[in-house]
Image (spheres, helix red, strand yellow):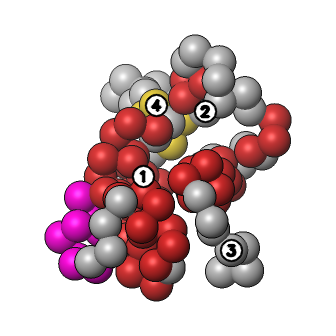
Amino acid sequence: MGTKITNLQEAHIYVLKKMCEMVGATYEDIDFKEDGWWNKYEWSQEQELEFKKWLVEKLKANTPLRRHLTGLSYNSKKLRESVAVEYASFYGWKYIKDLPVGKV
């Protein structure tokens, strides 16, 4: 992983940086205290699924990340999947709007 996670804030920053990377954004350029920050970028359902899979794997491999995001020490697949779904729901980007049929 390269970065030692020692608190909840560092855990959130680590995960949010990945979310930004997935949509071509830069973490440092987004004010996460601003209302509606999640509306500045969009991702597809496939990108969201890829993010959730990434987070599930990181939670499995990185005990400090898992402990800070969940408050729990155990490591079940069901827990990791639940955390990934909740994280994407609470912090995820808005979905790309589908174009009407026949429009480019």
User: Which residue is found at the position 64% from the left and 56% from the top?
Assistant: 10
Nearer to me, 100 or 11? 11
> Which region of the structure is painted magenta?
75-82
> Is-magenta flag for residue 74?
no
- 100 left or right, relative to 15: left
Q: Nearer the viewer, mark 1 or mark 3?
A: 3
Q: Main secondary structure of the magenta part?
A: helix
Image quadrant holding the N terminus, namely bottom right
How many numbered marks appear? 4
User: Seen from this angle, which residue lies furthest left?
Assistant: 78
The residue under label 1 is which amino acid type? Glu
Mark 4 highlights which residue?
A: 94
Gap between marks 3 and 2 measured at Cα: 28 Å
Q: Secondary structure at mark 1?
A: helix
> Is-magenta flag for residue 79?
yes
User: Which residue is found at the position 61% from the left and 32% from the top?
Assistant: 41
Gap between marks 1 and 3 measured at Cα: 25 Å
Gap between marks 4 and 1 measured at Cα: 10 Å
Query: Mark number for residue 41?
Result: 2
User: Seen from this angle, which residue lies furthest bottom?
Assistant: 61
Residue 79 in percent (x, y) is at 23, 67
Mark 1 highlights which residue?
A: 48
> How packed is label 3: few (under 14 Cα within 10 Å), some, or many (20 or more)?
few
Q: Which of marks 2 and 1 precedes in the sequence?
A: 2
Mark 3 highlights which residue?
A: 4
Are the residues tagged 1 and 2 within 8 Å (C-beta)?
A: no
Residue 46 in percent (x, y) is at 40, 55
User: Seen from this angle, which residue lies furthest top?
Assistant: 35
